[in-house]
Image: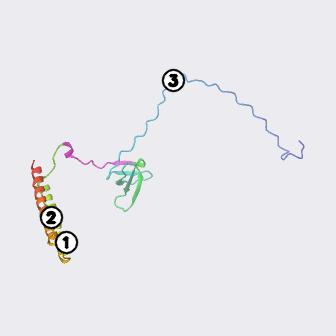
Amino acid sequence: MTQETRCYPHLTMAKARKPAPARKHVPPAKKTVDRKPAAPQPPPFPQVGDKVIPERSESEYIVTRVSPDGDEVDISLPGTNLERFRVKTATLKFVDRAPQPIRSAAKGHSTLNATEVAERIATVQRENLQRLDDDIDILTKFLKTEGAPKAVIDALEALSSEQHESWKDAVERLTDLLEE
């Protein structure tokens, strides 16, 4: 190589590197048990009313909706209109859990108030029969203006009577069952 073809004539070339010495594999003296770090506990299943703090936040939010699988929740900042939707449960720090509803009926305690239930049944009966009677009256008037045979109108009135009797029998059966 001549002086003319070199790009940097004033520099000398670097020497070739020596290969690194081979390392020996030394097995450990004692066999140690590899302990994996404890897996972080999954977050508790969220429920509406829980107080949480999302990551990168210092504010305390309240859970307003929980997805069916519990992976995502909607949260809102109390006293504001600020809401965050579909927040991953894994990113939340649970501060305060909403109280669990007490289900005394599941423990065998009866909380059924027979008087209230009977009143509610009577109200439904009265409203249902009133609505049926009003509809039959309207239909009867319409059929009379259209010239329908008397047998059709009589059949509607019979239907109304049958419904009244059916309700009466059902209420008696329900009342007997509630008294037991």
First-in-chain label (2 vs 3): 3
Mark 1 closeness class: few <14, some 14–19, many ≥20 residues within 10 Å: some
Q: CA distance from mark 1 to mark 3?
A: 92 Å
The amino acid on which the numbered mark 1 sits, given as a three-letter code, is Leu
The residue tagged 3 is: 31
The residue tagged 2 is: 159
Range covered by the magenta-colored residues: 93-107
Name the residue rendered at 41%, 54% in the picture: 86
Q: Is residue 99 magenta?
A: yes
Marks 1, 3: nearer the viewer: 1
Q: Is residue 153 left or right of residue 49?
A: left
Q: Where's residue 88, x and y in %?
A: 42, 50
First-in-chain label (1 vs 3): 3
Name the residue rendered at 43%, 38% in the picture: 39
Q: Is residue 45 above or below residue 75?
A: above
The amino acid on which the numbered mark 3 sits, given as a three-letter code, is Lys
Q: Where's residue 142, x and y in %?
A: 20, 75
* Front position in the image: 74 or 130: 130
Element under label 2?
helix
Q: CA distance from mark 1 to mark 2?
A: 12 Å
Q: CA distance from mark 2 to mark 3?
A: 89 Å
The amino acid on which the numbered mark 2 sits, given as a three-letter code, is Leu
The residue tagged 1 is: 139
